[in-house]
Amino acid sequence: MSESFFGDPEYYARCAKAYDAMIGSKVYNKVFWGTDPRQYSIFAAQAIASGKGPLLEVAVGTAQATATLHVASARTTTLVDMSGPMLKLAGESIATAAGGTLPDRITLECRDMLAPPGGRRYETILGLGLLHLVPDVTATVRELGRQLEDHGKLFLASLVRGSARSNAYLALLKAHGDIARIRSGTELFDEVRASGLGSVTLARRGAMAYVEISR
């Protein structure tokens, strides 16, 4: 299984800066998703604080919600995205937050998130705004689980059905090919649990669902 389902990486290359501004906008998130960018950071902070071993953030994008958190952490961290321009912005944001230089313990890798070189494993895997991009949540979670250490944890977020406005915008994104599936929170929970990876909890804030899987 590969992540070719994410579509054309060049799309993200062309709109990396616009995407970064949109994701960080309180107005955009409140109007369309009934949420707040700070909630993404809170969820990410929980993931980063959940252990001390190697951490992987997949589909990191521009690291809008996590740049300062990665700087404050002492964990060995790998950030993965298929878009080089997005990853470049992520590196710049982290370096700026760190005082000008990317910390040595943080590595940026432009590659398929489901194909780690050398069979690496991580204590924690984080993916913000990820699962609505994949057609098969169960298979994706299972493949990410192969990279998880024993007793490790996965922290994954996804857009789900919410208000009438959120649902209409989800339908528009789906028609444009920007997301793979529109799911309810219950459907997402069931698909994640079907991976058989471990115990699953799900919390919702507006049209964003936050999933934690403990091995």
Image (spheres, helix red, strand yellow):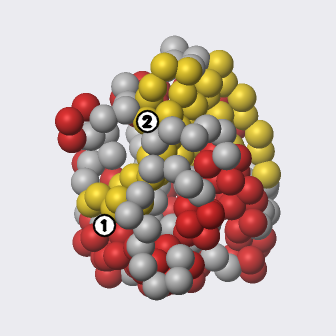
Pointer 1 residue: 83
**Residue on which the image places disc 2:** 122
Q: State the residue at coordinates (55%, 61%).
A: 70
Of the residues under marks 1 and 2, which one precedes in the sequence? 1
Residue 127 marker: none
For the C terminus, give its image quadrant.
top right
Q: Is residue 11 visible?
A: no
* Residue 119 visible here: yes
| Residue type, mark 1 in image | Ser
Instruction: Give the left or right position of residue 79, taking residue 114 as reference.
Output: right
Q: SS at mark 2?
A: strand
Looking at the picture, which amino acid does disc 2 mark? Tyr
**Residue 212: x %, y % from top left:** 65, 34
Q: Nearer the viewer, residue 78 or 193?
A: 78
Tag 1 secondary structure: loop
Of tags 1 and 2, which is closer to the observer? 2
- Which x, y percent locates residue 171? 56, 57
The residue lying at 53 percent from left, 46 percent from top is 126
Residue 10, position in %: x, y? Answer: 25, 72
Q: Quadrant of the N terminus?
A: top left
Q: Is residue 132 left or right of residue 88?
A: right
Q: CA distance from mark 1 to mark 2?
A: 22 Å
State the image coordinates of residue 46 (x, y, percent, origin top left): 70, 47
Q: Residue at x 57, y 40 (%)?
A: 52
